Structures are given as structure tokens and as C-alpha cells.
Image (tube, rainbow, N blue to C red):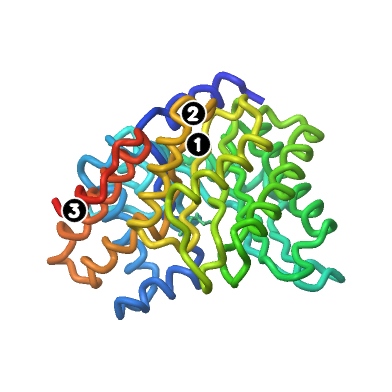
């Protein structure tokens, strides 16, 4: 493990007022996002979209990391630089989603597990040579009456910890993403209870596997009521989320970068702002690793048309800026109108 290399990546990624843009949707997921604006997903349309995101002028002021999907590491922008080089040009560190998606956990109805550990070290060496400096792995937990089970929680924690250890051994900073879904009709207390059990198990597993907490980033869900039932206001979300984080996340972890998980873009910004207002002296950065909540307005502006590229980049920059204000606890709803 090269500590200096990991330390320099963390220093480049963890800065007050900056966060991560997740543009690492798998092929089926990006196809769904594109279908919502009538665009067919193929290698070229994905290249154009992700080049547009990485090439947004000024983005580096608010964004310090860009998570890419495997094929994007190799793709070139119209200016003939690679997408990772386009990110670096704005001091945005390129990273890569390395898990291979979720499947049902055998003999454990309702639990899920993520694949991709076999051959991971070899893959990481290739990604690193292509410019990636950090990685992301997502475990997914659906909430139901008896799910996730204790066994499911333990198995998923083990996967995240094994992945994180391999990343650090190979000199890439691991983003550890345990996502408790907001789908369904659970109340906020149930979401808190499951998120706490999940995070406790994850940090125990990380300790067992000798993962250096100072050299990783946690990407959790916020604590929310099930989205089919009600929306909670930002103060309630922030309170419930901070209660869990304070119990589970050691102060050695430098940064907590939330996923948006199906929250509306404005909702995700307002919730982050409340978190930073309630915990201005938290030991960790409280920031973003948003996918949909950053990209959705930009996708709507783009509609797959070259003449809309600038409008799409402006929409992305606007959301990045408003989230930057939320990282400082300085966001106000009326700023949406400018
Ligand atoms: P969302 O912000 O759209 O949830 O995406 C973040 C992500 O990377 C999920 O793995």
C-alpha cells in the first residue's frame, strides 16, 4: 500500500465546499435515464453525455471527484482528450465504479449482495493506468418487514470491507457505499434503525480487514421516510441522519458524501444544507456524491441535442453551485430562482 498516493488523492478530493458527481450508471440504468428524454443509449450517446458533464467549465470549483463507468475511462471528448483528462483539467479526480451489480443473496429471501470481488486487484491496476484514482462499490439494502436480515447485513459488510482493503492495497481510495433504499412505505424510525445496523456492521468489518479509515470516503443514504408514503422536512431528515452518523461513523473518516437515492434535486440540496446547519463542527465533511440530483435537470435541458449542450452544462453548474452553498450551510430556497 502506498500511503503517500492515497493521502494525495484524499487531499485532492476532500475539501470544504466541493463534492463528487456520480456519472457511473451501469448500461441498463443509463438506458432508463436516457429513455426519459427519448434518447437511445449506445456507446456514442453515453460518450457525448459524459464528455459534456466532464467538460462543464467551472465545475471544478464545486466538484472534486467524478465517478465514471468502465467504458468512460477509455472514451475521448470531442477535443480528443480522454474523459479522465478532461476531469483533471479542472482538478476533478476521476474514479471508477468497480462493483458488478447486485443479485439476490442465496438462501436469504429479500436480501441482496453485490458481485465483483474476483479479479478486482487486476482490474484496479488497469483502471489506475487509465487515470482512475479512486473506486466505488455499492451494496443495496431494501427495507421490508424481515429484511434486511442480520445475515444479509453481515454478508454485505464483509463485501464492502474486502473491496475497500483491495483498493487501498492497490493505491486507490475506496468509496464505501452502503445504500439503504428509500423505496417503500417505512417510517423514518425504521429507516434509521436499519441504517444504523448497516453502518455499525460496515465499520466493524472495515476494522477487521485493516482498512485505514483516514483514507476512505463513506457514501451513505440520508435517513428518510419511505418515498411512497411521505416526505420529511429537511430539519427532520438532518436530525435523524446525524443521530445515526454520530453513533456509527468514526471521526477518523474524513468525508461523508451522500447519495441522492431518488430525492428530488431541490430536496437533496435542502437536506444537505440542513445537515451542515445542524452540524457545523462535524468531524467529517458533509457533502455530496449525487447522481440523479445533479444530472436530472441537465438531462432535461439536453434532450440529446448538440444545440442544447451549453444549457445542459449551465443546469449542471447551477445544481453544483447550490449544493456547494449547502455544503457550507448557506443555501436558501430563493437562490433556486436565479
Ligand atoms: P444517486 O445520487 O442517483 O442515488 O446516485 C448515486 C450513486 O452513485 C448510486 O450508486
Q: Is residue 166 left or right of residue 281?
A: right
Q: Nearer the viewer, mark 3 or mark 1?
A: 3
| CB atoms of marks 2 and 1 within 8 Å | yes
Nearest the viewer among 212 and 91 is 212
Q: Is residue 87 left or right of residue 156?
A: left
Mark 3 burial class by Cα count in 10 Å: few <14, some 14-19, many 20+: some
Identify the secondary structure beneath mark 3: helix
Q: Position of residue 254 (x, y in %)?
A: 54, 28
Identify whether 8 is placed above or below 209. Answer: above
Q: Which mark is residue 283?
A: none
**What SS does tag 1 mark?**
loop
Q: CA distance from mark 2 to mark 1?
A: 7 Å
Element assignment for label 2: helix
Quarter holding residue 51:
bottom left
Q: Nearer the viewer, residue 248 or 175?
A: 248
Q: Decide if residue 73 is in sight here.
A: no
What residue would you read off at disc 1?
A: 133
Q: Which residue is mark 2?
A: 9
Mark whose residue sits in front, 3 or 2: 3
Pointer 2 or 1: first along the chain: 2
Q: Depth check: give the residue in front, 254 or 249.
A: 249
Marks 3/1: CA distance? 27 Å
**Residue 42 pos. (x, y %):** 39, 72
Tell whether circle 1 marks a residue whose Cβ is less than 8 angstroms from ligand 1: no
In the rendered structure, find residue 314 and report the number of the disc placed on it.
Answer: 3
Residue in view at x 63 percent, y 63 percent: 101
Badge 1 local density, few (<14 within 10 Å), some, or many (20+)? many
Whichever of callouts 3 and 2 sits on the residue coming sooner in the sequence is 2
Amino acid at each position: 500500500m502506498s500511503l503517500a498516493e492515497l493521502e494525495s488523492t484524499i487531499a485532492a478530493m476532500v475539501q470544504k465546499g466541493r463534492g463528487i458527481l456520480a456519472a457511473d450508471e451501469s448500461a441498463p440504468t443509463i438506458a432508463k435515464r436516457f429513455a426519459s428524454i427519448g434518447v437511445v443509449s449506445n456507446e456514442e450517446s453515453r460518450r457525448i453525455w459524459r464528455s459534456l458533464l466532464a467538460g462543464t467549465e467551472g465545475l471544478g470549483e464545486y466538484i472534486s471527484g467524478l465517478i465514471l463507468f468502465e467504458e468512460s475511462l477509455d472514451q475521448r471528448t470531442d477535443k480528443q482528450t480522454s474523459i479522465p483528462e478532461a476531469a483533471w483539467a479542472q482538478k476533478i479526480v476521476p474514479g471508477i465504479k468497480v462493483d458488478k451489480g447486485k443479485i439476490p443473496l442465496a438462501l436469504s429471501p429479500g436480501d441482496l449482495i453485490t458481485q465483483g470481488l474476483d479479479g478486482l486487484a487486476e482490474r484496479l491496476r488497469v483502471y489506475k493506468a487509465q487515470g482512475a484514482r479512486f473506486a466505488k462499490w455499492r451494496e443495496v439494502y431494501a427495507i421490508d418487514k424481515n429484511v434486511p436480515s442480520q445475515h444479509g447485513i453481515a454478508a454485505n459488510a464483509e463485501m464492502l470491507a474486502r473491496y475497500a482493503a483491495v483498493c487501498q492495497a492497490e493505491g486507490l481510495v475506496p468509496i464505501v457505499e452502503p445504500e439503504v433504499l428509500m423505496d417503500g412505505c417505512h417510517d423514518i424510525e425504521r429507516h434509521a434503525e436499519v441504517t444504523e445496523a448497516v453502518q455499525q456492521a460496515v465499520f466493524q468489518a472495515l476494522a477487521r480487514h485493516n482498512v485505514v479509515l483516514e483514507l476512505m470516503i463513506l457514501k451513505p443514504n440520508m435517513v428518510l421516510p419511505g418515498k411512497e408514503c411521505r416526505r420529511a422536512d429537511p430539519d427532520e431528515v438532518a436530525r435523524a441522519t446525524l443521530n445515526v452518523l454520530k453513533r456509527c461513523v468514526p471521526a477518523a473518516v474524513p468525508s461523508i458524501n451522500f447519495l441522492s437515492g431518488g430525492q428530488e434535486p431541490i430536496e437533496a440540496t435542502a437536506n444537505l444544507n440542513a445537515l451542515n446547519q445542524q452540524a457545523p463542527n462535524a468531524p467529517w465533511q458533509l457533502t455530496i456524491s449525487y447522481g440523479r440530483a445533479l444530472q436530472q435537470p441537465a438531462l432535461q435541458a439536453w434532450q440529446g441535442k448538440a444545440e442544447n449542450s451549453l444549457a445542459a452544462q449551465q443546469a449542471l453548474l447551477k445544481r453544483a453551485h447550490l449544493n456547494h452553498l449547502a455544503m457550507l450551510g448557506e443555501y436558501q430556497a430563493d437562490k433556486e430562482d436565479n
